[in-house]
Amino acid sequence: MSLDLDTALKAITNAVAEINAGLADDKQISSGADDVLFGADSALDSVGLVNVVMAAEQHIGDESGEDIVLASEAAMSRKRSPYRSIRALAEFAVETAKDGAAE
């Protein structure tokens, strides 16, 4: 099964909900697809981002069967961070899954 954008968005949104379940109300991560995930105006610090990315990888695997890595040198070196929003991370996940399928 290949990863599509809708599946990636759902999986990452579910990952954020999972993380939010353990956070205080004032520390909640915004779950809007285009809201800031990491960066200015974000509730996440770098450790929180790692937790979200790991949960997202797990949820994507559960939803699609795709085994992808979202934390990589390629992701970190991009001009526009794939961690800036849930949508950007979902688009990066789809791209990563396609690149992995091409190998």
Image (tube, rainbow, N blue to C red):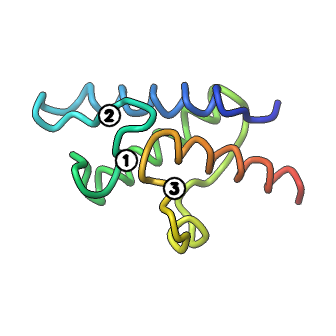
- Determine whether the residue tagged by mark 2 lies in a helix, strand or loop: helix
Pick the front one: 35 or 13 = 35
- Determine whether the residue tagged by mark 3 lies in a helix, strand or loop: loop
Vertical relation: 98 (above or below) 1: below
User: In this rendering, would 61 be left or right of 42?
Assistant: right
Q: CA distance from mark 1 to mark 2?
A: 8 Å
Q: Position of residue 46 (x, y in %)?
A: 30, 60
Compare marks 3 and 1 and give the one earlier in the sequence: 1
Q: Which mark is residue 19?
A: 2
**Residue 26 falls in which quadrant of the image?**
top left
Q: Amino acid at mark 2?
A: Ile
Mark 3 vs mark 1: in front: 3
Name which residue lies at 51% across and 55% down: 82
Viewport quadrant of the C terminus? bottom right
Name which residue lies at 54% across and 25% down: 10
Name which residue lies at 66% across and 33% down: 5
- Determine whether the residue tagged by mark 1 lies in a helix, strand or loop: helix
Vertical relation: 63 (above or below) 2: above
User: In this rendering, would 90 be left or right of 17?
Assistant: right
The residue singled out by tag 1 in the image is: 51
The reply to whether dot 1 and dot 2 touch (C-beta < 8 Å) is yes
Mark 2 is surrounded, within 10 Å at the Cα level, by few (under 14), some (14 to 19) or many (20 or more) other residues, namely: some
Q: Which mark is residue 82?
A: 3
Vertical relation: 94 (above or below) 10: below
Q: Position of residue 56 (x, y in %)?
A: 50, 39
The reply to whether dot 3 and dot 1 touch (C-beta < 8 Å) is no
Q: Amino acid at mark 1?
A: Asn
User: In this rendering, would 103 be left or right of 53?
Assistant: right
Compare marks 1 and 2 and give the one earlier in the sequence: 2
Q: CA distance from mark 3 to mark 2?
A: 19 Å
